[in-house]
């Protein structure tokens, strides 16, 4: 049996070396994807996003507010507009993401305690940009009123401690656990890149099985395994498993070793998760082909399942807030369980038992080929490929 597995694996290595599809999908594209996403978000958060200003007051106070807005890390004042319509058109043309409107008489109203109104407008077409700029604009508005209040209280003879207590009676002690830098790279790259790698595993696994039917080599393959489908699948997918496992471990080393992403869960948990992710992905690819022993249909199912996995992983929108039916279906995606294990056991360093359900789910996904093995065997021996 071991000799048969070895011979099939050698045959598969010859197939991999002759088909450029395998080279690009198993080596080139995974490396490009990893470098692309990690470099795209290497700053952690978007910085120096363009902001406009409509300043009808043109006073010392309004100019101080604009300088404070420009000093924030996320905001950069790039233009001054004469009226609101011009600023609105600039947002519609994607020249700016937000603008601050300071009406005439703002300073006089502040000094006389008449509660002036300043307005800020921001676009939420880009959710991240809108949220960050909203925070900056709201902070600037608060600082403006606080500065005037501070000056007034100093003129009345209040001490600095009294002024601080009056302006900020409650001090917030903020602790961002695990990701104190609020880096998008830390929580997006650790979900997007594994998801794309899993998608490649789905597709390559189904493609390699489907091409046996397409090129009429399925009977030769089964003959080398003495019609034992387990031996045939093991020998055929062993080279792919080793290549994908190497690529996945290189990705994990790059993220946690070279880029120093936080991983209090330890190296062994990372290695176990990488192994289970590769096994579950290949297992699901075999299962998808077994359900529909057709090259075209199995690739379509794998593509659909891989893309839906990004939505159901729960990285950007929590799964528990989705419809109950979607929440149940989310448990069928390998990426969902990969991400749960990552954030529970690696990112937060909680014990293995807290993610036992997700570990078992990946093991079950790895065992799925046993349910369709006989159907794959029958397809390889009896089916005729129809383009």
Image: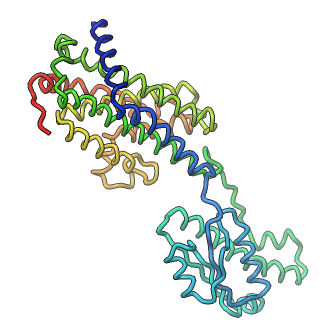
**Residue at point 25% right, 42% down?**
301
All told, the count of numbered labels is: 0
Within the image, what quadrant is residue 371 found in?
top left
Q: Residue furthest front?
A: 18
Quarter of the image that includes the C terminus:
top left
Within the image, what quadrant is residue 381 found in?
top left
Up the image or down, 160 lies above or below 283; here it is below
Q: How was this image coloured?
A: rainbow
**Residue at point 61% right, 48% down?**
42
Percent x, y of residue 145: 73, 79
In this view, the residue in front, 195 or 213, is 213
Percent x, y of residue 297: 20, 41
Up the image or down, 238 lies above or below 64; here it is above
Q: Is residue 216 left or right of residue 234?
A: left
Percent x, y of residue 78: 66, 74
Q: Is residue 290 left or right of residue 311?
A: left
In this view, the residue in front, 386 or 288, is 386
**Residue at point 56% right, 86% down?**
86
Q: Is residue 64 left or right of residue 134?
A: right
In this view, the residue in front, 241 or 317, is 241
Percent x, y of residue 230: 24, 17
């Amino acid at each position: 049996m071991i000799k048969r597995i070895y011979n099939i694996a050698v045959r598969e290595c010859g197939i991999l070396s002759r088909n450029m599809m395998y080279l690009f999908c198993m080596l080139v594209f995974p490396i490009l994807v990893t470098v692309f996403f990690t470099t795209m978000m290497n700053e952690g958060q978007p910085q120096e996003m363009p902001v406009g200003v409509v300043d009808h007051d043109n006073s010392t106070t309004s100019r101080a507010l604009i300088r404070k807005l420009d000093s924030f890390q996320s905001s950069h004042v790039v233009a001054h507009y004469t009226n609101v319509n011009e600023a609105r058109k600039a947002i519609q043309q994607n020249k700016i993401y937000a603008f601050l409107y300071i009406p005439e008489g703002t300073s006089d109203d502040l000094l006389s305690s008449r509660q002036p109104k300043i307005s800020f407008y921001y676009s939420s077409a880009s959710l991240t940009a809108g949220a960050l700029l909203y925070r900056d604009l709201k902070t600037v508005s608060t600082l403006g009123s606080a500065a005037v209040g501070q000056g007034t209280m100093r003129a009345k003879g209040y001490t600095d401690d009294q002024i601080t207590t009056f302006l900020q009676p409650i001090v917030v002690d903020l602790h961002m656990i695990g990701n104190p830098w609020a880096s998008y790279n830390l929580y997006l790259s650790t979900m997007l890149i594994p998801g794309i790698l899993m998608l490649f595993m789905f597709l390559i696994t189904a493609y390699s099985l489907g091409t046996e039917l397409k090129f009429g080599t399925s009977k030769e393959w089964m003959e080398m395994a003495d019609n034992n489908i387990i031996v045939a699948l093991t020998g055929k997918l062993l080279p792919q498993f080793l290549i994908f496992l190497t690529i996945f471990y290189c990705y994990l080393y790059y993220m946690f070793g070279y880029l120093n992403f936080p991983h209090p869960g330890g190296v062994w948990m990372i290695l176990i998760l990488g192994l289970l992710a590769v096994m579950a992905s290949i297992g699901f690819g075999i299962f998808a082909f077994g359900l529909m022993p057709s090259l075209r249909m199995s690739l379509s199912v794998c593509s659909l399942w891989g893309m839906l996995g990004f939505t159901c992983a729960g990285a950007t929108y929590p799964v528990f807030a989705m419809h109950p039916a979607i929440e149940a279906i989310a448990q069928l995606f390998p990426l969902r369980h990969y991400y749960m294990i990552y954030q529970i056991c690696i990112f937060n360093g909680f014990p293995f038992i807290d993610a036992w359900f997700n570990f078992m789910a990946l093991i079950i996904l790895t065992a799925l080929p046993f349910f369709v093995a006989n159907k794959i065997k029958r397809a390889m021996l009896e089916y005729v490929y129809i383009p």
